[in-house]
Amino acid sequence: MDRNTIIGLLLIVGMLLGYQLLVPEEKPQPQKPQQAGVPQKNVAPTATLDTAALGTFASAAKGTASDVILENKDVRVKFSTKGGQIKEVLLKNYKTFDQKPLYLFDEKGSKLGLELPNGPGKVDVSQLFFATNSQSQVVAEAGSGSVVFTLALAGGQTIEQRYTLGGSGFSIAYDVAAKNFGGNARLFWSHKVDRTEKDVNKLRNESTINYFTADESFDHLSPNSSGTEEKTLEEPAKWLSFKQMYFVSGLIGEGTNLSGVKLKSTAFPDNNQENLKTLEAEVQIPAADLAAGKGKFKLYFGPNDYQLTSQVAPEFNENVYLGYAFLKPVNRFVFVPLFNLLGGFISNYGILILVLVLIIKLILTPLTYKSYISMAKMRVLQPELNELKEKIGDDAQKMQQEQMKLYQQVGVNPLSGCIPQLLTLPILMSVFFLFPNLIELRQQPFLWSNDLSAYDDLIHFGFSLPVLGNHISLFTLMMTGSSILFAYYNNQTTPAAAGPVDYRTLGYIMPLVFFFIMNSFPAGLAWYYLVSNLITVGQQQIIKRFVDEDKIKAILNENRRKIATGEKKRSKFSEMLDKQLKAAEEAKKQAEAQAKKKK
């Protein structure tokens, strides 16, 4: 493994370790201590049902609840006439990690409710019984289906809640109209994040509240926070979302922004492996807006898929994390479109990743070729460098100066092989951030792994070890082995660099570092790197057949002659080296002169 490759790997490892370990977590606000294992209540505070205090609402506080179902081919939503609100949302085409039905909203741990002014206080509409003319089950097929809940009170006060679902998709139009009410209404939303994925720690850490403000700013509560974190938005929001790894629930203002937004995230104790966090939000709605028909919202309960979320609302696709800002364009315009294109005719995602690597490697072939040529030049010059080393001995500074002189004489830029490596870094880094957030890989089987979006734990300990955890990922182990073999192959063809340090030994250390980083990452990511390593070796073998090192040596000798006679103009890099060498020699002379004066 040459120095240029080592530099590239060091940059990758530095960024990965920085992402894993060095990025400071936002500290949540301190909270009152609570008993271990006993979570706080997960719903927003509501008005207590007191028929004497309900006033004009008292007549609507008695009745019998019945369920109404609204569904399409993707989602099934159950409503209750009590409150005219959602009871549960079932995603038809998805399962939990243990193959149970996947609910993104469940009345046991979720609530989306409305409070309306009632004299000096407010009344929780979920305590009231609504009428509906809808059938007990409404199926949205070619067009759309709607469920309407109405309530008429004394004094001409009326409430209407309308839910509309298209023939496909995960978005629900939610329209609220309330007439003859004064003051502000309050829309409150809470959700308890239950375990739906294999990696419970990752699910806990990535569950958070995202929001997009009216001034086009995307932000979120700290996903890694423990305890309780609260925030009041100073500006109105265009949308809010409860993001939990591969799925997201959203509240979007239609035609008007969400005002008076308050957010709260409460993490359950780490020893709770089933209930992970509670996410809460509330929005203030002027009663005048409800009376004027401006209480229009869109609800989204569905997969956190980049293509789907792009159609929900402006910047709603920010819920899918694509990495650092400089990596987002690579994922957005290269990998995401390629995944969708290949997914149209390749059903096995292990094979899809293999084809994806082949395409990327084919595109990067010119850079791989240029890097190999640079390495070949270094091999051709190695005998001369060895002679210099024998002549100079252990004087590292002198050896470096002579090495630069040699590069200058033959017109070689030692950094020419590093630039192609640096250009491939965004590809490697983009994949690292994208794959853990790709719902396309979720529960996709390949070889011994039944889920490419999670680590494969074919080797399981039953106990946890520091750094390593309670398993060894076989895909990661194979990736590490391929990296070591790749380093060994490179070291056979790459001469040792002049100087006291042999960088080639780092080629065996880096894969071991990657192993501990990657052991709990998705199997699909380890498979990508494994295939990439093997294809790179194959590429270099093919390139080697077309590279004549004797011809390269002749070209370098010809360059030496032309530069010496002035027939060939020196490159800017060569001129820079010349200036550096002269500056180094001048500094050395000054140091020697000062040493003589002291004597």
Image: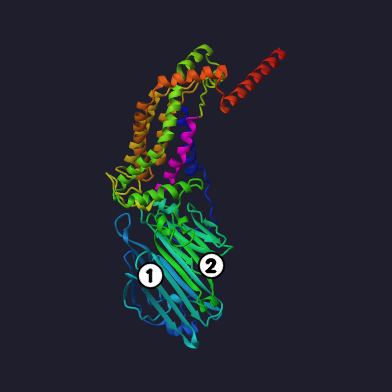
Can you name the residue that lies furthest to the left here? 447
Quarter residue 507 falls in: top left
In this rendering, the answer to whether 98 lies above or below 75 is above
Residue 84 position (above or below residue 521): below
- Secondary structure of the residue carrying tag 2 is loop
Q: Is residue 579 left or right of residue 38?
A: right
- Where's the N terminus, which quadrant? top left
User: For the magenta stretch, what is the residue range?
Assistant: 416-436
Q: Magenta: predominant secondary structure element?
A: helix
Amino acid type, mark 2: Asn
Residue 449 in sight here: yes
Estimate the x, y position of residue 307 in percent, counting from the top left.
41, 56
Residue plotted at (34% across, 77% down): 66
Return the residue nearer the eye: 319 or 129: 319
Residue at the spot of label 2:
257
Residue extending farthest right: 597
Q: Is residue 430 magenta?
A: yes
Q: Is residue 182 left or right of residue 488?
A: right
Mark 1 Cα-neighbour bin, 10 Å: few <14, some 14–19, many ≥20: many
Q: How far is the residue under mark 2 from the one under mark 1?
A: 22 Å
Q: Amino acid at mark 1?
A: Leu
- In the rendered image, residue 222, in percent from the top left (x then y), is placed at 51, 54
**Residue that badge 1 annotates:** 165
- Position in image of residue 526 (x %, y %): 36, 41
Q: Is residue 530 above or below residue 188?
A: above
The C terminus sits in image quarter: top right
Q: Is residue 514 left or right of residue 415?
A: left
Give the residue at x 48% y 48%: 329
